[in-house]
Image (cartoon, coloured by chain):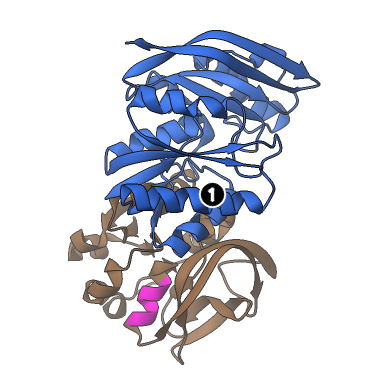
Amino acid sequence: MKVGVLFSGGKDSCLALQQSMSFHDVVCLISLISESQESYMFHVPNIEITGKQAEAIGLPLVRKETKGEKEKELEDLKKAIGTAKADFHLDGIVTGAVKSVYQSTRVQRICKQLGLWCFNPLWLKDEIELLKEVVENKYEVIISGVFAFPLDEKFLGRNLDKNVIQILERLKEEYGLSPAGEGGEMETTVTDAPFFKKRLEILDYDVSYKDYSGVFKIKNLRLTDK
Amino acid sequence: MILIISVCSDRLSYFEFVKPVEEILKKARKDSRTRYFLNMNHRDVGQAEKAIICGTALKDFRYLNSIEKFTWIKEVDKPVLGICAGTQILGKLFDCNLAERTKIGRYKVKIVQKNSLTSKEEFYSYFLNSKAMEPNEDFEILGESGNLKCIVKHKRKRLYGCLFHPEVLNPEIITNFLQESVPTM
């Protein structure tokens, strides 16, 4: 089956991509570039570097801009998936949805309308297990956005490793925080993974942060050999 | 042992529709065995205390073309919980009509008859179906969502069907099914 993967460049879409590669022919990535910081559907921090990530992975990217308004962004997503279906003869779509019924419902409906299979290989996966799988698979992941108490400035730009997972596990127990950020508490950016042919080297960045809300924005990067 | 039956013809769908059910059983400390429906044998059924037939992707209908693989459900007296596709299978086995009805998303379910799967009167559930079993006189209706008969039970056998996916928002439906006592034969 030829599939396209909805790709935000974060840990979930990369893990879903890796899993789908074991079963299907992944022929493209699809990214929605949202102008809104409040997007209901799409990952925002560093979304503009998905082109470089796709290049590092060695897959073509179908990219579509969206204003990120609640239902309008769904029309844009449908257009992007429709374009990918036509250009790459897709049979199905893969997403990195884990817990969001809102997101999965919308993507399932679009796939139904377009006659495509829909796969969500991380669906309902235990969040700590998911984080451990990312680290055990030797992904290089930075925390690129924090949006909830008690995640503060110290997390921004930090690599996801066993120590960070332990901290997130503790914050889950103390504050009920979703450790993998499935409620939008945190976003991540993947700079390397086993299926990346090249890795991303961050050359310049900017950190903005206020009151448990902040972004680690990658301003300049280059692809380097592994 | 609880027999978990996968009807996912695509292996990638297993992670979405079967693994979450396996995890619920694991948390409930229930011994389980998962089998793809085309690879099941009499021994799997014989050793099972109960069975759960999981759902699958919206475009996947291979199970409806191999309904003879499920005739054991009519022949043995074992509790079975059908989830989405599993409900369609129960319906087809007992000659119910399967209507083309698409329902995708989170919708309210109202309980219309007291039952052992839930003690709630209403709750929200996650639906992902394009066909709906229309229960005939062999079945009683336990729950509805709009005009969809979404929880059913066979009148004489302990065969339950949930057209929605309880593993997403209502895992207690699965654990209640597991706790229901099995009558002495």
Q: Residues within 10 Å of mark 1 (few under 14, many from 20)?
A: many
Which chain is home to disc 1? Answer: A
Tell which chain the image draws in blue: A
Classify residue A174 as left or right of residue B45. right
Q: Is residue A224 above or below residue A45?
A: above
According to the picture, the residue beneath numbered tag 1 turns out to be: A77
**The residue under label 1 is which amino acid type?**
Leu
Look at 30% across and 53% down and name the residue there: B34
Q: Give the percent coordinates (x, y) of residue A102.
A: 61, 52
Magenta-colored span = B87-92
Q: Is residue B132 above or below residue A55?
A: below
**The N terminus of chain B lies in quadrant:** bottom left
Classify residue B12 as left or right of residue A16. left
Q: Nearer the viewer, residue A163 or A44?
A: A44
Q: Nearer the viewer, residue B148 or A213?
A: A213
Classify residue B92 as left or right of residue A166. left
Q: Give the percent coordinates (x, y) of residue B158.
A: 43, 76
Look at 32% across and 54% down and name the residue there: A91
Residue B74: quarter of image: bottom left
**The C terminus of chain B lies in quadrant:** bottom left
Classify residue A14 as left or right of residue A149. left
Tell which chain the image draws in brown: B
Find out whether residue B89 is within the magenta segment: yes
